[in-house]
C-alpha cells in the first residue's frame, strides 16, 4: 500500500515541477495551487518533497530540481523578503539543511546557518520566547508565541551542532520549555498561541489564531506539538519533552473521529460539511513515527501509537489521497488552512503533502525528514 501511494505522489510531484518550472506553490481555493514567488512561509515543504523523492528512488531529476532553488532561498534571506515571522525553520530546514544533509554541499550549509541567525533575531529575552509574527513593538503580537514554532527549533539545534555556538541551543531550549509550560494544558490539549506582557514577560492568556475559539484545541496545533516536542527531546534528551509529546499524542488519538482523519478543531461542533484537516493527521503520523522510535519496547503507550499510526495512514491513503485524480497538484484532499478566517477551508495544503510523503517513505524505507541528523 505504501509503495503504490509513494509512486503516485512522485508522479504528481514531477508533474508539478515540469509544469511550473522555477515556481513555488501557494494555498488557494479550488482544489489546486497557485504558483508564484518565494514570499510565503510554506515554500520549503515543496523543496523538502523533492529531497524525499530523491532519497527514495535516487532519481537525479528531483535532486537537480531541488538544488536549482538554493540561490532563490539565499537571495530571499539577503533581501529579507517577507521574513517577519517565526517560520524560518519551515523554509530552510527543508531546503538548505536538507540539501546539506543529502549532498554535503557547503554552500547549502552556509545558507542554513544564515537562516538560523535570522531566526535568532525573533528572540525576545525579556519573555523567553521566539516571537511568532510582526515586529518587536507590535502591540498585538509583540509578546505572542505559537505552538507551530516547535518545528522551527530544529534549525537552531542543528546550528548549535554545527557551530557549538551556545546561543542557538539556549534559545531553542528556553523556547521549548516556555512552550511546554504555557501552551500545553493539564489534560494534554493545547493552546494555539499564548500572550505575554512585552515589558515584563508576565503571562497574560492563551488564545488562538486559526482554531475554533481561544479555549479550543486546533488539531494542527496539537499535531505540531506532538512532533515538535518529540524532536526537542531528540536534541536535548530532556525527558519532560518526550512525556509532553506522548500526552499530546494520547489526547489526539482519543479524540480521533470514526474515519480516523481529524476535523479542523477538536472542539468545533461537527455537522454535515464541517471541514477536516488531513494535514493535521499527516503531521501527527510523522510525530507518531518519531515517538515509536524514541520509546522503549516495554512502554505501555507503544501499541496505542502504532495502532493510531496504522489507522491514520490507511485512512489517508485509502480515502484522502488524490490517487483517483491523476492530474491533481496536491496529494491529499480535505486539508484546511484557516477555517475561521474562511481561507481555503477544504483544499490542498503543501505541508500536508510534505508530511504525508515523509510518513510514507519512512514507513516504506526508513527515510526520515530533515529535522535532525540521521
Image (spheres, rainbow, N blue to C red):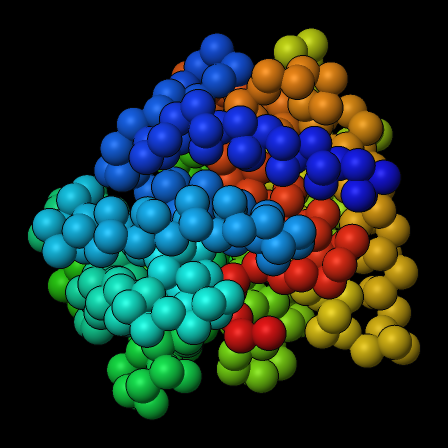
Q: Is residue 65 visible?
A: yes
Above or below for 18 versus 192: above
Please indicate whether residue 233 sits to the left or right of residue 151 in the image.
Answer: right
Residue 356 drawn at (x, y percent): 64, 42
Please indicate whether residue 171 sits to the left or right of residue 301 in the image.
Answer: left
Please indicate whether residue 10 sits to the left or right of residue 48 in the image.
Answer: right
Q: Quadrant of residue 14?
A: top right
Residue, x 59% and y 29% (percent of image)? 12
Residue, x 60% and y 16% (percent of image)? 327
Question: How many discs mark residues in the rendered view?
Answer: 0
Q: Quadrant of residue 88?
A: bottom left
Residue, x 18% and y 59% (percent of image)? 198
Above or below for 94 versus 283: below
In this view of the protein, which residue sits in the foreground, 205 or 154?
A: 154
Residue 189 drawn at (x, y percent): 61, 50
Residue, x 45% and y 41% (percent of image)? 46
In this view of the protein, which residue sits in the foreground, 116 or 281?
A: 116
| Quadrant where the C terminus is found in the figure | bottom right
Q: Is residue 215 visible?
A: no
Please indicate whether residue 344 sits to the left or right of residue 57 in the image.
Answer: left
Q: Quadrant of residue 279?
A: top right
Above or below for 115 versus 59: below
| Quadrant where the N terminus is found in the figure | top right
Residue 45 drawn at (x, y percent): 46, 45
Residue 142 drawn at (x, y percent): 19, 52
Amino acid at each position: 500500500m505504501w509503495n503504490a501511494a509513494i509512486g503516485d505522489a512522485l508522479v504528481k510531484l514531477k508533474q508539478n515541477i515540469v509544469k511550473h518550472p522555477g515556481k513555488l506553490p501557494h494555498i488557494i481555493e479550488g482544489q489546486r495551487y497557485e504558483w508564484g514567488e518565494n514570499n510565503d512561509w510554506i515554500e520549503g515543504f515543496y523543496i523538502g518533497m523533492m529531497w524525499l523523492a530523491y532519497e527514495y528512488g535516487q532519481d537525479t531529476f528531483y535532486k537537480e530540481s531541488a538544488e536549482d532553488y538554493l540561490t532563490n532561498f539565499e537571495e530571499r534571506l539577503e533581501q529579507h523578503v517577507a521574513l517577519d515571522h517565526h517560520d524560518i525553520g519551515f523554509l530552510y530546514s527543508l531546503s538548505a539543511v536538507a540539501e546539506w544533509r543529502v549532498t554535503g554541499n557547503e554552500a547549502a550549509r552556509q545558507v542554513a546557518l544564515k537562516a538560523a541567525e535570522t531566526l535568532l533575531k525573533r528572540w525576545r529575552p525579556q519573555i523567553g520566547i521566539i516571537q511568532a509574527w510582526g515586529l518587536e513593538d507590535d502591540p498585538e503580537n509583540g509578546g505572542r508565541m505559537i505552538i507551530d514554532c516547535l518545528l522551527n527549533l530544529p534549525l537552531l539545534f542543528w546550528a548549535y551542532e554545527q557551530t557549538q555556538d551556545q546561543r542557538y541551543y539556549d534559545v531553542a531550549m528556553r523556547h521549548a520549555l516556555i512552550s511546554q509550560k504555557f501552551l500545553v494544558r493539564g489534560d494534554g490539549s493545547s493552546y494555539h498561541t499564548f500572550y505575554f506582557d512585552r515589558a515584563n514577560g508576565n503571562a497574560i492568556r492563551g488564545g488562538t489564531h486559526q482554531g475554533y475559539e481561544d479555549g479550543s484545541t486546533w488539531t494542527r496545533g496539537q499535531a505540531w506539538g506532538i512532533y515538535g516536542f518529540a524532536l526537542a527531546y531528540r536534541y536535548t534528551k530532556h525527558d519532560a519533552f518526550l512525556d509532553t509529546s506522548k500526552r499530546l499524542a494520547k489526547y489526539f488519538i482519543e479524540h480521533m473521529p470514526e474515519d480516523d482523519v481529524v476535523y479542523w478543531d477538536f472542539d468545533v461542533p461537527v455537522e454535515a460539511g464541517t471541514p477536516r484537516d488531513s494535514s493535521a493527521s499527516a503531521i501527527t503520523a510523522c510525530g507518531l513515527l518519531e515517538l515509536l522510535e524514541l520509546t522503549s519496547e516495554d512502554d505501555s503507550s507503544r501499541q496505542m501509537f502504532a495502532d493510531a499510526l496504522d489507522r491514520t495512514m490507511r485512512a489517508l491513503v485509502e480515502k484522502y489521497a488524490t490517487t483517483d485524480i491523476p492530474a491533481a497538484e496536491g496529494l491529499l484532499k480535505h486539508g484546511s488552512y484557516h477555517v475561521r478566517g474562511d481561507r481555503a477551508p477544504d483544499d490542498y495544503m503543501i505541508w500536508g503533502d510534505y508530511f504525508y510523503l515523509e510518513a510514507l517513505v519512512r514507513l516504506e524505507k526508513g527515510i526520515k525528514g530533515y529535522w535532525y541528523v540521521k
